[in-house]
Image: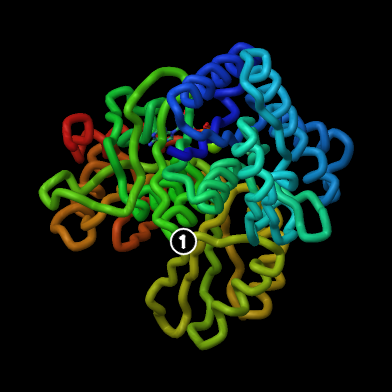
C-alpha cells in the first residue's frame, strides 16, 4: 500500500523521538509499504520562532515571518532523513517547494493551488523515503508561503491525494480521536471511526486533533485518514465517508475552544445594509467573524452580536467606533474572555431532545449560556472561558459518552 504518514511536533520533539519515528517508518517499509512522510517542526519550534520575530519587532513583515517559521520543518526533515540513513534506509528530506507543493500567496495563510508530485514519485521509485516539510509551499515564482497554524495536516492530505495514496495516516501523541480532549476528560473514549462531516465540525469547533481544512480536502477526494499513535501500535480512528448504524449514540464527540471574544453592537437601526456596513470593514481588516446573532427588533432598533478570535479583538475594537457611526448604532460592548463547547454528531438536529439535554447539563453545572449556534450536525454554546473544562466534563457525562459507541 502507498501511504502518507504525518508526524506532528510532539512526535518529533527531540532526537530520541525522531529516531523512534524513523524506526516506525522503517518497519512499514520493511513490511512492503511505500511510505511518504510529512513532518512538523520539533515541539514548540514554530512558537519559539514567532516569539523571536516579535522580540525584533511588534509587526514582523509577513514575507520574512514565513521565511523564518518555515525553517522549523526544514530542521525536522533533515534530522529524520539522517536518522533513517543511519539505520541503513535511503531517505531524502524535501522542502515543500522541492516536493512540488504550489501555493497561492497570502503569507501566513497560503492555500494549496496544486501539487506536482513527480519528484516525490521519482524518489519513491529510486527506493528512497521522501521526507517532506509540512506547513509550507511555494508560489509559482518561488516565494515561500506557510499554510496557517497546524497546516502540516493539510500538506499530508494534499500530497496523499496527488500521489493517489491509499490513505493518509496522522500519527500523534494520542492514539486516535476521542469523545473529548483526553487532557480534560480522563474518561473520554477513543472512537473507531468518524465521518468527514463529524470530524470537520469537531476540528472547526476547536479539537486540535486534525486541521479542519485537511479534513475538508480529504472529504472532497474521499481520501481516508487514519488518526493513530506515533508512539505505540494502536488501531486508531478512521475518518471516512460512510456513516453507519442509525441506532448508535448520535453525539459522537465534544469539542471545545477557549479562544473566543464577543462584540455586541447596541441599538442598531433595523434596516437593509446594516450587516454589510458592520462586517465589510472587519473582513477587509482580515478579521474573521464566527457566530452572528441578531435580536428581533424592538422599536426598529436591534442588538447585533458576533464572535471572533481573541487575537483579533483589539483590532476590531479599534474599528468599531467608526462602524457604529456609519450604521447609526448606540455604541458597542465587548467581552474577551469567552469559550465555546459543542456537541457534534450526524442526526442530532433531527432527533429529539439533544438541545434540551445540553442546556440542562450546563444549567445543572451552574454555567450561563451567552450565545447559541447550530448547524445540521452540531450545537454550540458560548460560555465563560473559565468554565469550559467543567462544561466539557458535564456534557460528556450527560450524553453518556464514556460508555456509548
Ligand atoms: P500534532 O503535534 O500531532 O499536530 P496536536 O498537539 O496538534 O498534535 O494535537 C494533539 C492533541 O489534541 C492531543 O494531545 C489532545 O490533547 C488534543 N485533542 C483535543 N481534542 C481531542 C480529541 N477529541 N481526541 C484526541 N485528541 C484531542
Ligand atoms: N509547525 C506548524 C505549527 O506549529 C505546523 C504544524 O505543526 O502543523 O503550526
Ligand atoms: Mg496539529
Give the residue furthest to the front: 126
| Residue at x 36%, y 45% (from the top left corner) | 239
Q: Secondary structure at mark 1?
A: strand
Where does the N terminus fall, quadrant-wise? top left
In this view, the residue in front, 184 or 137, is 137
| Residue at x 25%, y 55% (from the top left corner) | 346
Q: Residue 70 placed where, x, y %?
A: 75, 40
Residue 10, above or below 146? above
Residue 119, above or below 75? below
Where does the C terminus fall, quadrant-wise? top left
Residue 202, above or below 270? above
| Residue at x 38%, y 20% (from the top left corner) | 233
Query: Looking at the rendering, which quadrant does residue 254 occupy?
Result: top left
Residue count near mark 1 (Cα–Cα under 10 Å), binned few <14, some 14–19, many ≥20: some
Q: Which residue is mark 1?
A: 291
Q: Residue 290 placed where, x, y %?
A: 50, 60
In this view, the residue in front, 194 or 355, is 194
Determine if residue 385 is in view: no
Q: Residue 47 placed where, x, y %?
A: 69, 33
Query: Looking at the rendering, which quadrant does residue 265 occupy?
Result: bottom right
Q: Is residue 20 left or right of residue 137?
A: left
| Residue at x 69%, y 57% (from the top left corner) | 103
Q: Is residue 186 left or right of residue 165?
A: left
Amino acid at each position: 500500500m502507498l501511504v502518507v504518514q504525518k508526524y506532528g511536533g510532539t512526535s518529533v520533539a527531540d532526537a530520541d523521538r525522531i529516531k523512534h519515528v524513523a524506526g516506525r517508518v522503517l518497519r512499514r517499509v520493511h513490511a512492503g509499504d511505500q511510505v511518504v512522510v510529512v513532518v512538523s517542526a520539533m515541539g514548540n519550534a514554530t512558537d519559539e520562532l514567532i516569539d523571536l520575530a516579535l522580540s525584533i519587532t511588534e509587526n514582523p513583515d509577513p514575507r520574512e515571518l514565513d521565511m523564518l517559521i518555515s525553517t522549523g520543518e526544514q530542521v525536522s526533515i533533515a534530522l529524520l532523513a539522517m536518522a533513517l540513513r543511519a539505520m541503513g534506509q535511503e531517505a531524502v528530506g524535501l522542502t515543500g517547494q522541492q516536493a512540488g507543493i504550489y501555493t497561492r500567496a497570502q503569507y501566513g495563510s497560503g492555500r494549496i493551488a496544486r501539487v506536482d508530485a513527480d519528484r516525490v514519485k521519482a524518489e519513491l521509485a529510486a527506493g528512497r523515503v521522501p521526507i517532506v516539510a509540512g506547513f509550507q509551499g511555494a508560489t509559482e515564482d518561488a516565494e515561500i508561503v506557510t499554510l496557517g497554524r497546524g497546516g502540516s495536516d493539510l500538506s499530508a492530505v494534499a500530497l496523499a491525494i496527488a500521489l493517489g495514496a491509499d490513505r493518509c495516516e496522522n500519527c500523534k501523541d494520542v492514539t486516535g480521536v476521542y469523545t473529548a480532549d483526553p487532557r480534560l476528560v480522563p474518561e473520554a473514549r477513543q472512537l473507531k471511526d468518524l465521518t468527514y462531516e463529524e470530524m470537520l465540525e469537531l476540528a472547526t469547533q476547536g479539537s486540535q486533533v486534525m486541521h479542519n481544512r485537511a479534513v475538508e480536502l480529504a472529504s472532497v477526494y474521499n481520501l481516508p485518514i487514519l488518526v493513530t499513535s506515533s508512539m505505540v501500535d494502536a488501531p486508531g480512528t478512521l475518518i471516512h465517508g460512510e456513516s453507519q448504524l442509525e441506532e448508535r449514540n448520535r453525539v459522537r464527540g465534544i469539542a471545545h475552544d477557549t479562544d473566543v471574544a464577543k462584540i455586541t453592537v447596541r441599538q442598531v437601526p433595523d434596516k437593509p445594509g446594516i450587516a454589510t456596513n458592520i462586517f465589510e470593514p472587519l473582513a477587509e481588516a482580515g478579521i474573521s467573524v464566527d457566530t452572528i446573532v441578531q435580536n428581533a427588533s424592538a422599536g426598529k432598533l436591534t442588538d447585533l452580536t458576533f464572535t471572533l478570535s481573541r487575537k483579533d479583538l483589539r483590532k476590531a475594537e479599534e474599528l468599531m467606533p467608526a462602524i457604529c457611526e456609519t450604521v447609526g448604532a448606540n455604541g458597542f460592548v465587548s467581552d474577551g474572555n469567552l469559550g465555546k463547547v459543542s456537541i457534534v454528531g450526524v442526526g442530532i438536529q433531527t432527533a429529539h431532545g439533544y438541545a434540551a439535554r445540553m442546556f440542562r447539563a450546563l444549567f445543572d453545572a451552574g454555567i450561563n449560556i451567552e450565545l447559541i449556534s447550530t448547524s445540521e450536525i452540531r450545537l454550540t454554546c458560548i460560555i465563560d472561558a473559565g468554565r469550559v473544562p467543567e462544561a466539557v466534563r458535564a456534557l460528556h457525562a450527560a450524553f453518556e459518552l464514556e460508555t456509548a459507541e
